Image: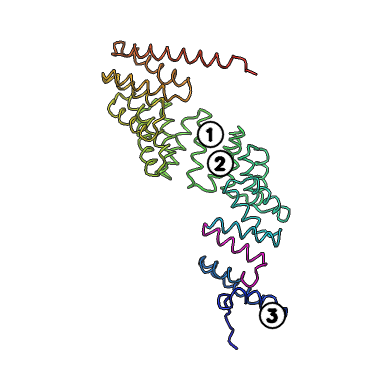
Amino acid sequence: MKAIDVHSQSVGRAGTWTLRHFPFLKGWIQRLAQRYAARALDSYMRGDLVAAELDYCEALQWQPDNPKFHSDLGQVYLEQDKVEEAEKQFEKALEYDYKNLRALKGLGSLLQVKGDSARAMYLYLRYMEIEARDSLILHNLGAIFHNMGNYSEALEYYTRALKEEPDDVFILKNQALTLIADRRPAEAKEILLRAAELDSEDDSIDRMLASIFETENNDEKALEYYRSAIKKDPDDPETHLQLAFLYSTRKDFRKTAEHAEEAGKLFVNSGDYGGAAQAYWELGWDYYILKELQKSLAASEQSLRFNANQGPVYFNLGLVLLHLGREAEARKRYEDGIQNLSQISDLKYYAIDDLCDALKENPNLKGGREILSMLEKRYTATSQQIAAESSSPLLA
């Protein structure tokens, strides 16, 4: 006999409810629902998420209290980025079976991505009461504790995750990040060197190692790893910018400018205008040091187009304009910089000290001494005001 493919649409909602509530049809209903679920699973395994969604929904029309169908549908929704629908299905699965592992894991991961770490942790810990050796859950708990600043707990969970998956590079990298945050760079370095052996093409490992070598003042090794990272991923703007900063500390401003300019272009292309502002700020200063004043002017103006609230960049512009003999414009830029200070120390470091250096090199810099006097008076007055406010007793 040919099997009849019954759809809930043809029966109707009321009809579906009626059929489910005839005891002698219970077995038939279960088999029908399982048939749709099996077809959904086949579609899911083939990567056809749309078909899988439709068949899981059909299965649930016949068996709405089946937690597995809800959790499986939640996973399908999750992989389609239908986050709200996925959350509802996982929650429904847990209503019918509070130990449903797929729902606990799926809902926990979803909530973690949404930033609800407390609820995610609760679900993960419930999951671990049933299955304590799931490396992904252990890893995710490690990440949550890291973000909470509880590094000892984070490292404990990463260690347990690595016991299950000792060659998981992602876990190793996160463990290293926690060790760095916990001020244990030597241990982090050993972990990263092991990760690099497992995945020699991962540029992020090179960047992390370069950063550690920088903190150890080992510039040669830092350069080696930054260069390696760029070779593996030449389009990563952050690596170019970090390499620019390193060249700057080594006073190699031609190389600094080369990488700062590349970083700026890449940040713009990726839509990261905050990063672009920082890169062009660096580039403007590099060109000033290289005495390429028009290029310096253009780079600093570009930086301010991306972020108009950078006091130090206005100071850089003012300094360049003084060298170009545009005294009135220079003064205006210094005043703009004062209006955009994030902290008073920036006025000393980026404005007063740099202008003092310029006047030592060229004592006849027109307008320079007058602007320096203005800056020093403003710095003294503001510093005194801050000191008075911090020492004054609180009013009741």
Labels 2 & 1 near each other (Cβ < 8 A): yes
Helix, strand or loop at disc 1? helix
Magenta span: predominant SS is helix
Look at the image and tell me whether residue 41 can be seen: no
User: Residue placed farthest to the bottom in the image?
Assistant: 1
**On screen, residue 374 above or below 103:** above
- Magenta-tinted stretch: 60-81
Tell me: 224 left or right of 165.
left
Q: Which mark is residue 25?
A: 3
Who comes first in sequence, dot 3 or dot 1?
3
Find disc 1 in the rendering and name its residue. Answer: 212
Task: Please name the residue that numbered disc 2 is placed on.
Answer: 192
Q: Earlier in the sequence, mark 3 or mark 2?
A: 3
Q: Secondary structure at mark 2?
A: helix
Q: Which is nearer the N-term, disc 2 or disc 1?
A: 2
Query: Is residue 254 rendered to the left or right of residue 206?
Result: left
Between circles 3 and 2, the one closer to the viewer is 3
Identity, as a three-letter code, of the amino acid under mark 3: Leu
- Quadrant in which residue 91 is drawn: bottom right
Would you call the spot at circle 2 few (<14 residues within 10 Å), some (14-19), or many (20 or more)? many
Quarter of the image with the C terminus is top right
Label 1 packing within 10 angstroms: few (<14), some (14-19), many (20+)? some
- Position in image of residue 35 (x %, y %): 61, 75
Nearest the eye: 358 or 251: 358
Q: Position of residue 85 (x, y in %)?
A: 57, 59
